[in-house]
Image: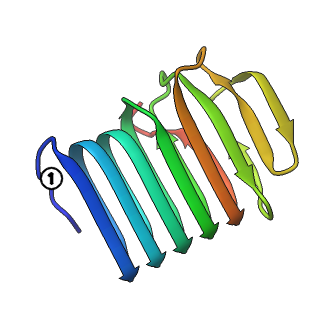
């Protein structure tokens, strides 16, 4: 687990093993994992995550910039504050997409795809996994 290191840029990577970041407050967060769980709890500006195998769990206290979460095999979960305004583009090849606690407007919904504006739109939130499900929900602190 990585402790809070301030407001710089956080770059955490793992080839085989878990990456866990708790109570982080950073300007930008980028992380990659080949095999293992990846979790982040805290505040970040731009968030970029790439995984090959393993689940991703991102819990943002607030949305401050674009979020890009990409996986090949594994579920992706994004918890975000209820008032966050963003343009959602979620896509999975073999999995389900679940949106809880948010209403989506002016969007597109089909098997494996969910696109639209949340709370009027704003930052881009792009989530893509080939084999896994996607969940977008309200952060329990909001």
Q: Quadrant of residue 92?
A: bottom right
Q: Report the side of 109 relative to 7 (left or right).
A: right
Specify the color scheme: rainbow
**Residue neighbourhood size for the residue with mark 1, other residues' Cα within 10 Å, grouped as few (<14), some (14–19), many (≥20):** some
Q: Residue furthest bottom?
A: 16
Q: Quadrant of residue 128?
A: bottom right
Q: Residue furthest left?
A: 6
- Looking at the image, is 38 positioned above or below residue 108? below
Q: Residue at x 42, y 30 (%)?
A: 142
The residue lying toward the viewer, choosing from 70 and 85, is: 70
Q: Residue at x 81, y 51 (%)?
A: 112
Horizontal and vertical percent for residue 73?
A: 64, 72
- Looking at the image, is 105 positioned above or below residue 102? above
Q: Report the side of 63 relative to 2 (left or right).
A: right
Residue at disc 1, secondary structure: loop
- Looking at the image, is 29 positioned above or below residue 61? below
- Looking at the image, is 36 positioned above or below residue 59? below
Q: Report the side of 57 relative to 43 (left or right).
A: right
The residue lying toward the viewer, choosing from 136 and 142, is: 136
The residue lying toward the viewer, choosing from 13 and 20, is: 13
Q: Is residue 100 visible?
A: no
Q: Residue at x 35, y 54 (%)?
A: 30
Horizontal and vertical percent for residue 69?
A: 53, 52
Q: Is residue 93 visible?
A: yes
Q: Residue furthest top?
A: 120
Horizontal and vertical percent for residue 131?
A: 72, 68
Q: Residue at x 76, y 39 (%)?
A: 114
Tally of numbered discs: 1
Q: Report the side of 89 relative to 142 (left or right).
A: right
Q: Quadrant of residue 64?
A: top left
Q: Which residue is disc 1 drawn over?
A: 4
Question: In which quadrant is the N terminus drawn?
Answer: bottom left
């Amino acid at each position: 687990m990585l402790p809070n290191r301030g407001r710089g840029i956080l770059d955490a990577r793992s080839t085989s093993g878990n990456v866990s970041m708790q109570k982080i407050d950073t300007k930008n967060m980028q992380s990659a994992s080949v095999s293992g769980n990846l979790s982040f709890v805290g505040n970040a500006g731009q968030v970029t995550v790439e995984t090959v195998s393993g689940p991703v769990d991102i819990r943002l206290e607030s949305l401050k910039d674009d979020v890009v979460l990409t996986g090949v095999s594994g579920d992706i979960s994004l918890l975000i504050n209820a008032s966050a305004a963003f343009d959602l583009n979620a896509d999975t090849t073999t999995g389900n997409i679940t949106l809880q606690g948010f209403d989506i407007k002016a969007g597109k919904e089909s098997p494996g795809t969910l696109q639209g504006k949340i709370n009027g739109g704003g930052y881009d939130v792009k989530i893509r996994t080939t084999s896994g499900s996607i969940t977008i929900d309200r952060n329990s602190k909001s």
